Amino acid sequence: MPHRESAPEHSMDPRAADERPLADRPLIDTAIYRHGVRIATPESLGETYRQLPGADGTMAWIGLYRPAEEELLAAADEFDLHKLAVEDAIVAHQRPKIERYGDTLFVVLRAATYLDDVEEVNFGELHLFVGPNFVLTVRHGQAPDLSVVRRRMETDQDLLRRGPEAVLYAVLDHVVDGYAPVIAGLQNDIDEIETEVFDSEPHVSRRIYELSREVIEFQRATRPLLAILRSLEAGFEKYQIDEELQRYLRDVADHATTVAERVDGFRQMLDNILTVNATLVTQAQNEEMKRMTEASYAQNEEIKRISSWAAILFAPTLIGTVYGMNFDVIPELHWSLGYPFALLLMIMVCLSLYAIFKRRNWL
């Protein structure tokens, strides 16, 4: 049999490999109840089946944790479970749902816990087979901790004596109550993200995307619960469900509806936050482009001014350079009016260039 992670309820004492038939091997937790009182604690599936009497008011509650295929098939043989439901329980990774096979209900739930340090929602999968006189739970994750549910039920004998449907209610109630810390954790993360968005934190877009994925996955776990509970309510009269138990199940349905509405709200909020963040990023980019454009414009203006003055100063320099050449024969070299003419020419050229650049707003 392949190695599997030990369940929290399992003893940590080392022991040799068990060579007994699968139906006779120890279970995670199992008990037989009569009218809400534990009357036996069998050590194996086969012993549970043999000790389970057919009397009214008696039921078995069996817990399995990540069982091997052979172990689950042995339980299916003992309690006549439908092969399609057993196949789903073996494969796992099923969506939350409820199905009825004859007088046995098959329910798939996804429990959730919030990991604050990594801001992630961790999911566990739970399969329940609810028969006329038995409840078989198959967990594929640490959550939910069904030992808490069992202790609660054993201290409330009036509830436990109502039979397997009461155990189903208690498990549903525990799973739905476990969503409350997840809701609180997600709400806190969304509040932090809203602050980061308006503070223009650089990595907030990635955080929004990752949190959106967590919310969508959480929504997939919680939304189908409403259909499961509606299906149970639809069968109250047909299957003669205890009236008090009906009230309990309606209370769970109210809580599940609240959770589903909060999760829907989270998804809408994250969509809005993502839109606002994209708008703020675009505005910041536009502002940056505006600043760069203004800086470029100012730089161009400075370049035009410098170029204009350089052109103005170049004209007299050019004239002075021509007349400063050391040649014996230069036109107007010995002209008496040559000097004032050169100065006048320099002034006229400079004024002309100044007027031209001024008209073009270069100066």
Image (cartoon, rainbow, N blue to C red):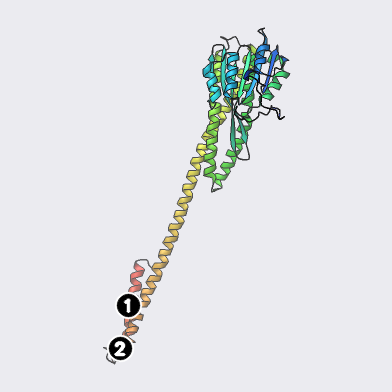
| Closer to the camera in the image, 38 or 120 | 38
| Closer to the camera in the image, 66 or 162 | 66
Question: Percent from the top left, x then y, of residue 363?
Answer: 39, 69
Upstream in the sequence, badge 1 or badge 2? 2
* Disc 1 and disc 2 in contact, CB within 8 angstroms: no
Q: Amino acid at mark 1?
A: Val
Q: CA distance from mark 1 to mark 2?
A: 16 Å
Q: Amino acid at mark 2?
A: Gly
Task: Name the image quarter holding residue 112.
Answer: top right
| Closer to the camera in the image, 275 or 341 | 275
Question: Percent from the top left, x then y, of residue 255?
Answer: 61, 24
Q: Is residue 241 above or below residue 273?
A: above
Q: Is residue 41 above or below residue 205?
A: above
Left or right, 227 with reference to 63:
left
Left or right, 132 with reference to 99:
right
Residue found 71% across the figure and 22% down from its top:
151
Task: Name the image quarter holding residue 34.
Answer: top right
Left or right, 109 with reference to 311:
right
Question: Percent from the top left, x then y, of residue 353?
Answer: 33, 73
Q: Which residue is tagged 2?
A: 338
Q: Is residue 66 above or below residue 166?
A: below
Residue found 58% across the figure and 10% down from its top:
239
Secondary structure at badge 2 equals helix
Residue found 30% across the figure and 88% down from its top:
338
From where the camera sits, is residue 267 visible?
Answer: yes
Q: Which residue is tagged 1?
A: 349
Question: Which residue is farthest top?
Answer: 55
Secondary structure at badge 1 equals helix
Query: How many numbered circles does the render carry?
Result: 2
